C-alpha cells in the first residue's frame, strides 16, 4: 500500500485559508478531507472530519474491508463524534488489529498510517503509540517524537495528548527525560516538552502533582524562559497561567526571578502573558 501516493492537488486547494465555519467548507474540500487526500488547514476543518467515514475510506483503499468489517460496526455503534473520543477509539482498534499481525506486516501497516498524507490519519498513529501497553514511557516518547515535530498543528496537539496519561503516571521520570527536549534545536520539540506537562492543559486531564507542586517542572521551564519562538513562548506562558490558578504567588516569584536573570523581550512577553489571570 502506498500511503503517500502522489496526488495532483491544485495549488489553490493547498494554499487555501480554510472556512471559518463548518457549514462554509466547500463540498470538494470536505470530500478531499474525508477521502484522506488533503490535510486540514485550520481548526474548523480539523474538527469537521468524520473519522469513522475516513477510516472506512482508508481501509477500503488499502484493501482491508474484510479485516475491518467488525471494527466498522463497533465504531458506528459508538455513534461518537467528539474528536477527543473518536481518535483514541480508532487508535485502539488499529492497535488491536496490528497486534494480531506478523511483525513484518505490522511494521509496514503502522508506517502507512504514520506517514499518511492525511493529518487525521497520522493522529490515529500517535494514539496507537500512546495506548500501546507494550511500550514503556521511554519508548513511547521516542516513538512519539516524529509526531511532536509534525508540520501539522493537529498532529502535534494529538501527539502530547496521546502520551499525557503515561507522562502523568510516571511524572518524575517523564520530567527527567523531557529535559533534553526542552533544549532541543527544534522549537516544535521544545514546545512539546512544555505542553505535554501543563498542569491543566487543554482537552486533557489535569496533572494533580504539578498543580500542587509546580516547582517539579522548573528545570524544563527555566530552559525556555527566554525562547525566541512565539510557539514555545505561548506554551510556557500558558503553563504558568495554569499554575497561577492554584499557586499564584509561586508564579509571581518565578516571573520576578526570570526578568532579573533574562531581561529580554522574549522573557517579558512570556511573563506578561503568564500573569494575565493574576489579580
Image: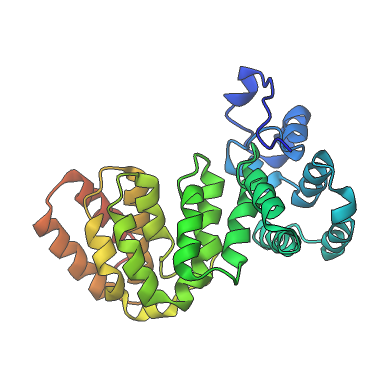
Q: How many marks?
A: 0
Q: Position of residue 262 (x, y in %)?
A: 13, 53
Q: Position of residue 74 (x, y in %)?
A: 85, 64
Residue depicted at 46% across the width and 74% down the height: 168
Q: How is the image coloured?
A: rainbow
Q: Position of residue 92 (x, y in %)?
A: 70, 64
Q: Nearer the viewer, residue 271 or 123?
A: 123
Image quarter hosting the C terminus: bottom left
Q: Nearer the viewer, residue 141 or 209?
A: 141
Q: Is residue 83 above or below residue 24?
A: below
Q: Relative to residue 144, is residue 187 drawn left or right?
A: left
Q: Relative to residue 9, is residue 31 drawn left or right?
A: right
Q: Position of residue 232 (x, y in %)?
A: 34, 49
Q: Nearer the viewer, residue 34 or 175?
A: 175
Q: Is residue 71 above or below residue 147?
A: below
Residue depicted at 36% across the width and 62% down the height: 239
Residue 120 at least partly seen: no
Q: Relative to residue 18, is residue 196 drawn left or right?
A: left
Image quarter hosting the N terminus: top right
Residue 236 at least partly seen: yes
Residue depicted at 59% across the width and 44% down the height: 43
Q: Nearer the viewer, residue 94 or 254?
A: 94
Q: Relative to residue 202, is residue 184 drawn left or right?
A: left
Amino acid at each position: 500500500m502506498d500511503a503517500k501516493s502522489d496526488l495532483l492537488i491544485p495549488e489553490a486547494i493547498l494554499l487555501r485559508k480554510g472556512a471559518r465555519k463548518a457549514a462554509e467548507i466547500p463540498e470538494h474540500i470536505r470530500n478531499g478531507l474525508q477521502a484522506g487526500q488533503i490535510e486540514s488547514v485550520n481548526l474548523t476543518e480539523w474538527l469537521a472530519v468524520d473519522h469513522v467515514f475516513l477510516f472506512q475510506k482508508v481501509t477500503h483503499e488499502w484493501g482491508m474491508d474484510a479485516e475491518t468489517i467488525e471494527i466498522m460496526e463497533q465504531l458506528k455503534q459508538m455513534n461518537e463524534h467528539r474528536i477527543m473520543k473518536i481518535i483514541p477509539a480508532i487508535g485502539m482498534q488499529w492497535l488491536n488489529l496490528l497486534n494480531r499481525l506478523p511483525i513484518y506486516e505490522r511494521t509496514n501497516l503502522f508506517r502507512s498510517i504514520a506517514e499518511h498524507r492525511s493529518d487525521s490519519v497520522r493522529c490515529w498513529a500517535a494514539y496507537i503509540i500512546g495506548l500501546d501497553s507494550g511500550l514503556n514511557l521511554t519508548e513511547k516518547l521516542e516513538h512519539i517524537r516524529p509526531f511532536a515535530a509534525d508540520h501539522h498543528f493537529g498532529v502535534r496537539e494529538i501527539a502530547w495528548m496521546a502520551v499525557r496519561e503515561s507522562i502523568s503516571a510516571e511524572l518524575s521520570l517523564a520530567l527527567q527525560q523531557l529535559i533534553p527536549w526542552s533544549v532541543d534545536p527544534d522549537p516544535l520539540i521544545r514546545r512539546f516538552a512544555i505542553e505535554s506537562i501543563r498542569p491543566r492543559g487543554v482537552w486533557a486531564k489535569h496533572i494533580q502533582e504539578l498543580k500542587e507542586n509546580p516547582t517539579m517542572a522548573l528545570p524544563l521551564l527555566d530552559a525556555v524562559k527566554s525562547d525566541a519562538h512565539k510557539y514555545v513562548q505561548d506554551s510556557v506562558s500558558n503553563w504558568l497561567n495554569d499554575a497561577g490558578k492554584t499557586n499564584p504567588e509561586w508564579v509571581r516569584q518565578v516571573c520576578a526571578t526570570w526578568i532579573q536573570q533574562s531581561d529580554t523581550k522574549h522573557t517579558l512577553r512570556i511573563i506578561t502573558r503568564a500573569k494575565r489571570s493574576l489579580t
